[in-house]
Image (tube, helix red, strand yellow):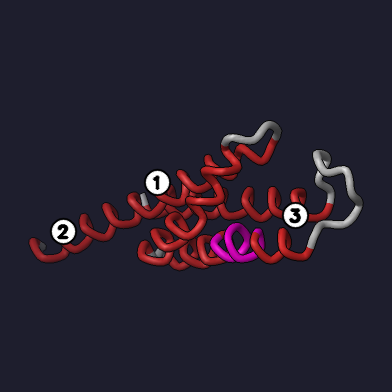
Amino acid sequence: MRITASLVGTTAAAVSILLWTILVFINPYRDRAAIEIDTLVVTLATLLFPACLALYSSLRLKNKPMFVSFFWSLPVSLYLTGTPGIFKFFGLTSVLYLASAVLMFINKAYINKKGTHD
């Protein structure tokens, strides 16, 4: 279960980072060539930073930072879920953060329970 939790979290974080890169640098839905600075700052703070935290969390198998990543990215991810195009997948990556965190929590509880009975 540890490998599954790590794989789910790592995949979600990698997809979020890829989607953020597309959103900022090669957004096919934007008319202008350059992104506005306020959009860059908001997406950096609400999409990229949580993805980096999720990547760290999944590699270290820490569930608390993964829960933080989920709640941190949730508002903007929910907003982007309602948009047309590929950016709706930010909602899926946010849900995968939650799934990874829950799997890590269950794994930790199972190990603690098993360790006290052996």
Q: Residue drawn 21% across and 58% down?
A: 109
Q: Earlier in the sequence, mark 1 or mark 2?
A: 1
Q: Nearer the viewer, mark 1 or mark 3?
A: 3
Residue 32, percent across and down? 89, 49
- How many angstroms separate mark 1 from mark 2 (CA)? 22 Å
Q: Residue drawn 46% across and 65% down?
A: 57
Would residue 92 be found to the left or right of residue 118 on screen? right
Task: Name the foreground residue: 62 vs 22.
Answer: 22
**Does the stretch in magenta take in 102?**
no
Chief secondary structure of the magenta portion? helix
Q: Residues within 10 Å of mark 1 (few under 14, many from 20)?
A: some
Task: Name the foreground residue: 38 vs 109.
Answer: 38
Image-quadrant location for residue 88: top right
Residue 85, percent across and down? 70, 33
Tell me the magenta residue range: 43-50
Q: Earlier in the sequence, mark 2 or mark 3?
A: 3
- Element at badge 2? helix
Q: Earlier in the sequence, mark 1 or mark 3?
A: 3
Say which residue label 1 marks. Answer: 99
- In the displayed structure, 68 sits above or below 2; it is below
Q: Residues within 10 Å of mark 2 (few under 14, many from 20)?
A: few
Q: Which mark is residue 114?
A: 2
Of the residues shown, which amino acid type is indicated by label 3?
A: Thr
Q: Residue drawn 26% across and 52% down?
A: 106
Say which residue label 3 marks. Answer: 21
